[in-house]
Image (cartoon, rainbow, N blue to C red):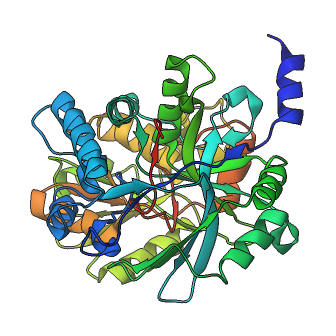
Amino acid sequence: MNTAGHSEAKALRGLELTPFRGLRYDPDRVGSLAAVTSPPYDVVVRPDGLHHLQSADPYNIVRLILPQAPTPSARNEQASDTLRRWQSEGVLAADDKPGLYVYEQHADDGMVQRGIIGALRVSDPSEGVVLPHEDVMPHIVADRAALMRATSANLEPLLLTYRGNGSASAAADLVERMADRPPLLATTTEDGYSHRLWAVTDPADLARIQSDLAQHQALIADGHHRWATYRRLRAEHASPSPWDYGLVLLVDTARYPLRVRAIHRLLHGVPVADALAAVEGLFRIRHLPVSLPAALEALADSARDGNAFLLAGDGAFHLIDQPDPDLLARTIPTDRPAAWRTLDAAVLHAALLDHVWHIPEDSPAHIAYIHDTAATVEKAERDGGTAVLLHPVREEVVRDLARQGVTMPRKSTSFGPKPASGLVLRTLDV
């Protein structure tokens, strides 16, 4: 291995963000911009949220990111046909000039997040430019890759964070200045978030942003499967090509700290009584006849002292904590840092899923990963399964493990707010 070459790459190449001609909805051709947007594909809770978004507007972005057809190939062909038709009809149109896009999200509680959307050079892991912190599931990468091949497009940006110099950096200064100008678009989605978008096309401004970002590395906050997809598709095409780049939103968390939430698990076909019976004697079990907010407070209190989970699905909540040390010694890999071995997600996957419940973590027939807490509980109650609710991991733990090159168990964290899908797309033939 040419370690000198790798060291040189790390020293000379940071984040390389390039302008692109954004593909955007024409507001005059759709009912409203809010009606055509969607959360990222993996946040849409099937089937309720998907059906709701499909009926919200005939041009909703879910028809591209989650096409519905009997077979995978038919779904991808449908998405490709839909994208081309919307372009030919003028529903989606490319901006005249290549640019980077400043994107702002504003919540009801006053939280503001701003970042820069652009086409980022897809780097190799050895370069240490983009740091993953979670493992990925091969079947999801294959699914996303097939969709991107069929559409020849990046349909939604993934979310990356970097630690800039706050307001002292050129990128941060430009982001703040753009926010004082009239936006390209502004809309408020039904979740209460307001969204605004600006295009940066001035060559001098673009050069300042690119020079600033070239000094930084980024952490994948949301979109591990899409980043793995970008890497797979780049490897399939001779360089240079548009596939050398992928659509991202970069947020400077020195200026705009993200919120970190947990991603919950839904165990299909496992009644709560069976799940509890299996952990009897391995965890302390406390039954909580309380509301969801009160149960989550109890989970947070217990998580301060060690691993803890909430089980739900039978109309009540059951807190399991204080795992048997012998169980952990038998099941948790010892070749990982202590910070990894004590993660709730590590204990959940290595001890509970693998050895206690015997549930394959990558089988959609057995387990679902859901971001919304209430939706996870509701689906478990409706379907007769078990909801496993987790407490969020602190961002500094995530970043520290990523810098050590240690990936967390898949679907360990949910950073947010996530960019709305449908505000700007990138086609690879424009």
Q: Position of residue 185 (x, y in %)?
A: 47, 74
Residue nearest the observer in this picture, 249 or 364: 249
Residue at the spot 86% in from the left edge and 19% down from the top edge: 5
Residue nearest the observer in this picture, 84 or 376: 84
Q: For this view, does 391 lie left or right of residue 404?
A: left
Confirm whether residue 199 shows in the render: yes
On-image quarter of the N terminus: top right
Q: Position of residue 377 (x, y in %)?
A: 25, 66
Q: Position of residue 239 (x, y in %)?
A: 62, 20
Check the image and name the residue furthest to the bottom: 109
Q: Is residue 225 above or below residue 168?
A: above
Quarter location, residue 197: bottom right
Residue at the spot 42% in from the left edge and 40% down from the top edge: 153
Check the image and name the residue furthest to the top: 1
Q: Position of residue 4 (x, y in %)?
A: 90, 18
Q: For this view, does 115 lie left or right of residue 16?
A: left
Confirm whether residue 278 shows in the render: no
Residue at the spot 34% in from the left edge and 36% down from the top edge: 151
Residue nearest the observer in this picture, 231 or 337: 231
Quarter location, residue 313: bottom left
Residue at the spot 60% in from the left edge and 45% down from the top edge: 119
- The count of marks equals 0
